[in-house]
Image (cartoon, rainbow, N blue to C red):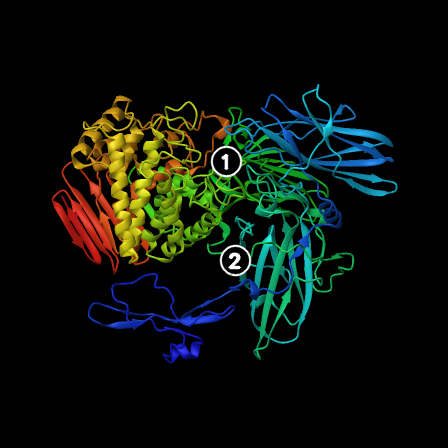
Amino acid sequence: MVASSPRALASGRADLWDSGHLKGGSVAVRYDGAPLKAGKAYHWKVQIFDENGTSAWSSPSSWETGLLDPSDWTGKWIAVESADERTDRLASPVWVEGSSPSPEHPRSFRLPFRSTGGEGMFTIVADGAISSLALDGKPLDLPHRDPNAFGGAPAARIKFPAPAGEHVLAVDIAPIAGFFIKPAVAVAAQLRLDEATGVRRITTGWQTRLGTESLWSEALPAAFQPVFPWPPAPGRLLRRTFVETGNAIRARLHVAALGGYRLWLNGVRIGDDELQSEPADYSRRIPCRTYDVTALVRDGENVLGALVGDGFFASYQAPEGRYAYGAAPRRIRLVLEIEAADGQAHRIVTDPEWRHTDSPLRMSEIYAGEDQDLRLWPEGWLSAGFDASGWAPAWEAPLPEAPCSPAIAEPVRVVREMPPIAVRRIGDRRFIVDFGQNFAGRVRLRAAGAAGQQITVRHAEVLDPKGELDRSNLRAARAEDRYILRGRPGSEDLEPILTYQGFRYAEIEGLPDLDAGAVTGLVLSSALHETGTLRIDNGRLQRLWLNTLWSQRSNFVGVPTDCPQRDERLGWTGDAQVFWDAAAFNMDVTAFTRSYCRILRDVQGKDGAYPLWAPSPSGLGWGTTSATPGWADAGVMLPYTAFLHSGDAAIVDENWEAMTAYIEGILARNPDALWTNGRGADLGDWLALDAKFPMDETTPKALIATAMLARSAEQLAKMADWTGRSAAASHWRGQHDRIRQAFQNAFVKPDGSVGNGSQCGYIMALGLGLLDTGRQKAAGRRLASDIRRRGTLLSTGFLGTPLALDALASVNENELVWDLLLRREYPSWGYMVDHGATTIWERWNGDTGDVAMNSFNHYALGAVAAFLYRRIAGIEPVEPGFARFKVAILPDQRVGSAGASVNTARGRIETHWTCTATRTALDLTVPTGSVAEVELPTGKTSAGPGSHRFTF
């Protein structure tokens, strides 16, 4: 029952909706009553029935709506920039371009100018690699750029004297070497001359030539003018006062921003969300959140304050760069709705009444870290009576093209605090702090010192042989926080505000002494409820599962990222696709999946292709125009997995058209049902053991692609069946059968050999059920034989490894499953644990891998945790929301006991088994509304709600 007021609900009057009696233990029942209105509270309760017809009512509860439509927003977007930054922005540089055939053949550009005497500031960025920059023939120093950096160099800003007279700025630019080489280069720049007569800004007048023998000619403007990626700028403080004369009984603050923000009302921080505004394709939608601030509003003068910086919107996002989703400036929009006891309501909005000034945040970027000058905090700026007459009035920002869109997923928060396990002095005023755990987050430091004293915090995942930080795998990420102390009596708390890093170790420099109690690691993660706990009577395997959970915590930060430490941190779809099964056991990923899938749909190509990563400001990624097998399939795998675990059909309904468009787009290019055409980046079994380069074809890529297509079609058929789309279910079952047959005809021989004989080929065929019974056993023998021939090891990469143990279990190679799980030599999961891993590595050989791509916190190879839940612990959903689940354990006396508990939509499922040489005992708890399908050596049986014991 849903009512418009507590009184109506208490009287049993469902004036908005009465669902009626829904039989069958329904979960995730969607509201289907009167249309919802913005900013309203709705009151509800549920009546439940048992098998005898006895019923009981839940306690009443409520939900609220935020601003549901763009028209619900009032007030203006205000700019977050200084007056100089605004003037620079309005004199925007013009991109000029020219051909350049290869990285060995740079194109030259020059900008002649005349100065009347003064200082010059040159801001330049290139589409390509700058090999030299000179003023009047004398080289100018460019910031160092790590040669392994993912993406081009950001805009550089160089200052120099500009004496009176004629001058020439000259730059050479070549295409960036890599997988995809663009045969052209471009440059954009602004020269700001601070002269006695005033400030001039020069953005045009470029000349160009290719080689040293051709003549200089006018450089033509590029046909496409990208956004100019202005360098990092200090954050801004904003404040507005308002007076309340009545008793506020309800106050809600709605916030949207293009930039990162933190908010206060009357000196009290609003909420505990971090890293807002979270990652999104800001060119399509701008996430907004709503906060209950009723308790913070007071009679008299009130002060609403904000600190706004670059955040995800303006920070460098690899490989595109800064301001990848739209032009400067950073912007914020707020609506504070206050309702008084008499029912009257009014709003405080972003308007010219706001005032702003410089902030202590001198620089803040996601990859780089933060620079804070704590001396610049204005004393009392969040209090009534503060004199803000020296602050500038806010000005209206350009209206973003995208609408404000309520955030769906749980926000990022500090989910844990980590004390150090060791603090070690390594030099004068230098210390290494070991938190004992690799994680994503920040260092909070309590420090005392004189005003102006500098303290630096650097981050790393590992140490070098000398015991110093090894930061070589961070590539271009500075991953460093710098503080200038205020010099207050006692101590000061130092902590980043709008950024985060991935690390286990921190180097703290600038203090004469450091006590462990003064340092805390703050773990940041999307605040998803953790639902699963795995228990295995083997310390190494228990640590493997825990490492997987920590990698999930570290990489579920607004979107599912690949890594939290280097200059990447992107929502790679391939990583998510292989890991989502494990993720859905560890945490309730329902809302997180809906949020990320909305981003996937925003980026989806016109033929239905999903991107390599999302959000992505430049289409499908890496210049591709079609779907990449195993990566794009995330668009189907994620809704399928989330629905199977939660029972919430909304995730299917929201993505149905996008999912069908995806598979139909592939089949349109491949009418024979073999995915041979249009395979995007075609990464194959990425990072397979036998590969010399990550995307080598160690397994036929058409085989992998067709297998992925078959699974996506099968998952779509199941979702159609579960949601009542009977015609669609029949259609997609037929398409799956057609793809499966095409796979067999093309890649499977009568003797059971598959593809080129690689392990990945057999694993795909077996693990995805693509073989007929007659050839399944033969293929299984060949797979097991190859694994043993190599020394009981897997040669698979990102796509093959997650399916490997399922493939072996499907042909009853249970002993070999355990051999691989218990293996400790390279390559294996045990090798990682034995070598000190506290999270999952990107590569099997992370301890010796190529630093150009070597994350120590990368969950893809941790996808094995799903197998541990499903087949070791024996909890595998077979109908949405665990209405039915399978219990088919694989006990082994080398591990005396195992089990798991998973909190599902229907209640807690728990298993525990013990195994000896003569007897196995299984204890099982089934929640109300669920049925367990138990598979034992003696046969199959069903178990209803309650506790059960089985022995064999």
- Percent of width and height locating residue 246: 63, 76
Q: Secondary structure at mark 1?
A: loop
State left or right for residue 712 relative to residue 627.
left
Image mark for residue 622: 1
Q: Quadrant of the N terminus?
A: bottom left
* Residue labelled with disc 2: 405
Q: Residues within 10 Å of mark 2 (few under 14, many from 20)?
A: some
> 33 or 818, which is in the foreground?
33
Q: Of label 1 and label 2, which has the lower sequence position?
A: 2
Q: Residue furthest top?
A: 213
State left or right for residue 95 relative to residue 884.
right
Looking at the image, residue 725 lies above or below residue 539:
below
Q: Amino acid at mark 1?
A: Trp
State left or right for residue 768 relative to residue 575.
left
Q: Residue at x 45, y 76 (%)?
A: 5
- Percent of width and height locating residue 608: 42, 46
Looking at the image, residue 184 lies above or below residue 607:
above
Marks 1 and 2 sit apart, C-alpha to C-alpha, by: 28 Å
> 642 or 166, which is in the foreground?
166
Quarter residue 567 falls in: top right
Q: Can the viewer see residue 908 in this picture? A: no
